[in-house]
Image (cartoon, rainbow, N blue to C red):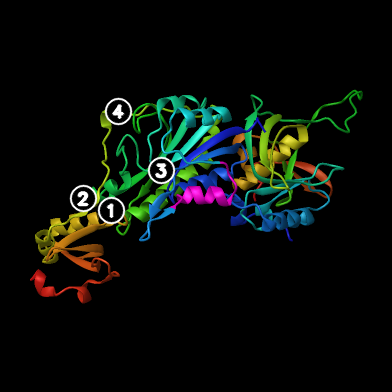
Amino acid sequence: MDHFFPTIFFGSQEDSLIILKKILTLPYLTIKLVVTQPPRPAGRKKLLTPTPVGKFAQDKNLPLLTPQKLDFKNQQKINQIQPALGILAAYGQIIPVQTIKAFPRGIINIHPSLLPRLRGPTPVAQAIFNGQKTTGTTLFLLDEKIDHGPVIAQKKTAINPKDTRESLTERLFFLGSQLLEEKLLDFLTGKVNPKPQNHQRATFTKLLSRENGYIEVEKIKKALSGNHNLTNKIERKIRAFNPWPGTYTLINNQRVKIISAHQKNQNLKIDLIQFPGRRPIPWNKGLDQSLFQ
Amino acid sequence: MEIITAPSPVLTKVSSPITNIDLKTFRLGKQLISSLTDKGVGLAAPQIGKNKTVFIIRLPQQEAQLFINPAITGHSKKKQYSLLLEGANHHQEDYQPQPFLEGCLSLPHLYGTVKRWAKIEACWFNNKGRKVKKTLNGLEAIIFQHELDHLKGLLFPQRVKKEGGQFFQEKNGQLEKISHQEANF
C-alpha cells in the first residue's frame, strides 16, 4: 500500500466532512489517520459529544486521534505513520511547525476565503458582514504563520443576498472539495507549483464571541423605521452571525435573540426572534410593538 | 442497455465521482459489461447514460475489468501516435507501419489517430472497492486514456481535431480518409 500517498486528515466541523468524504473517493490517497478535536460537552445536558468528524471516523472504522494538544507524544504517533501529505479543513487548532515538518508534501489547508484576504478564524462571517459580492476558497500549504503559506489553487463564488454563515460555509467547502478533485493530483505530480501570497494585501479576521452579536435597540429602531445604512448593516450582521455566535438585543434586560430578518425597501423587517429558554417565534407575535415606537 | 451515440449531452458532461462504492456501483459495472458489444474493448458509464466516473476495459481474450474513480498519477514524457504492429508483415517489401486508430462505440464508423501517452501510472478502485495502482502500457494505456476522456466529457474527435490528426470513415467494410469537416458528430 505504500505506493499511495499516505494521508492524515485534520478536521472537526460538519463542513470538514465534505472534504473528508471527497478524499475517500480519490484512489491515489490513503487515509492513514483522522485527527479531530476531543469530545466536548454539548447541548443542554452537556453530554460529552465527539466532533462530527470523530463520529464519522468511528462509523467508518478510520483510525482516529483526538489530542487536546499536538504535543510530543501525539507528534510521535504522527511520525510513526510516516505520512506523505496532510489535508486540513476547519480543524480548529493551530498546527505546530514540527508537525508540519513531518509531512514531506506538506499540509494542505482548505480555507474559505480568497487569500490573502480574510485570514484567520472567521473569514465567512466577515465576508458577509463586509457586504462583499464575492468570496471563494483557497487551497494552500500551511507554514509557520496563520493562513500565510503558498497557494495551490483558488475558486470564486458569489455571495447570495440570503446567504448565512452556515449556508456560505457549506458552499465554500463544497467548492474546496471540487478544487481538491481538480488540482490535488496536479500538485502531487508537480504540474502545479504553489505560489506565494501577496502579503501586502492581506486582511485579517478575529474570533467572534457571543458579545459581538449584540445590537443596540436604538439602532434596531432606526433600521425598522427606514434608516437604509443601518438596515443594511444589521441585516448583514444577522446573516453573518447565523448560527454562531448569533445576534441579540436587550429588551427590559432580557436577551432577545434575533434569528432572521430581511430588507423591505429601506426598512429592516425582523422575521424570527427568540426569548431565553423559549422556541423561536415570529417577530410580530413575540413583541409588544410599542416598545419600538 | 443501449449505447448512446453522439450527439448527446450525456456524452459531453463531466461525470461525478462515486462517493460510496456499493451494490449500485457494481450493478453499474455489470450493466457496462453486458452492454459492451463484441467489437468494443472499453465502455464508460456516460455511454449508457450514467454520468458517473466508472468504466470497464476488456482486452482481447481477457475478462472485463472495472475501474471506479480512475485517475492518472504519472505518464511517459510525450504524447505520441501509436503504431499498429500486430498482424503486420514486417518482411514485406512495401511494409509501412500503420497508425493505431481509435474508434468509439458512441461514434459508429468513425476512426482517427490520437496522441496518447504510451505508458501511464494509473490508480482506481477495483471491483472489490479496493484501491489499485498499476503501470499500464500499450493498448491498455490507450484505452484507459480514451475512457478517462469520456468521464471528462471529451470524445476522441476533439483530440484528433486539436492535434491535427487524421480521420477515417468506415464504408462497406473499407476505411476511407476523410477531412476534419466531414468528421461531423
What range is drawn magenta here? A49-63
> Within the magenta stretch, is there residue A121?
no
Percent position of residue A117, x then y: 30, 37
| Inter-mark Cα distance, 3 to 4 | 22 Å
Within 10 Å of the Cα at label 2, are there few (<14), some (14-19), or many (20+) other Cα atoms?
A: some
Question: Residue at the spot x=67%, y=35% of the render?
Answer: B122
Residue occupied by mark 4:
A199
Q: Which mark is residue A90?
A: 3
Q: Amino acid at mark 2?
A: Asn
Q: Say above or below: A83 vs A138.
A: above
The verdict on a common chain for dots 3 and 2 is yes
Task: Tell me the element at label 1.
Answer: loop
Residue occupied by mark 1:
A245
Question: Residue at the spot x=77%, y=35% of the render?
Answer: B139
Between circles 4 and 1, the one closer to the viewer is 1
Residue A110 position by quadrant: top left
Task: Tell me the element at label 3.
Answer: loop
Chain of the residue under label 3: A
Residue occupied by mark 2:
A212
Q: Say above or below: A229 vs B62.
A: below
Which comes before the other along the chain, label 4 or label 1?
Answer: 4
Task: Tell me the element at label 2.
Answer: helix
The answer to whether the residues at label 2 and label 1 have Cβ atoms under 8 Å apart is: yes
Which comes before the other along the chain, label 2 or label 1?
Answer: 2
Q: Amino acid at mark 1?
A: Pro
Which comes before the other along the chain, label 3 or label 1?
Answer: 3
Chain of the residue under label 4: A
Task: Tell me the element at label 4.
Answer: helix
| Inter-mark Cα distance, 3 to 1 | 17 Å
Instruction: Judge whether residue A59 can be spotted in this image.
Output: yes
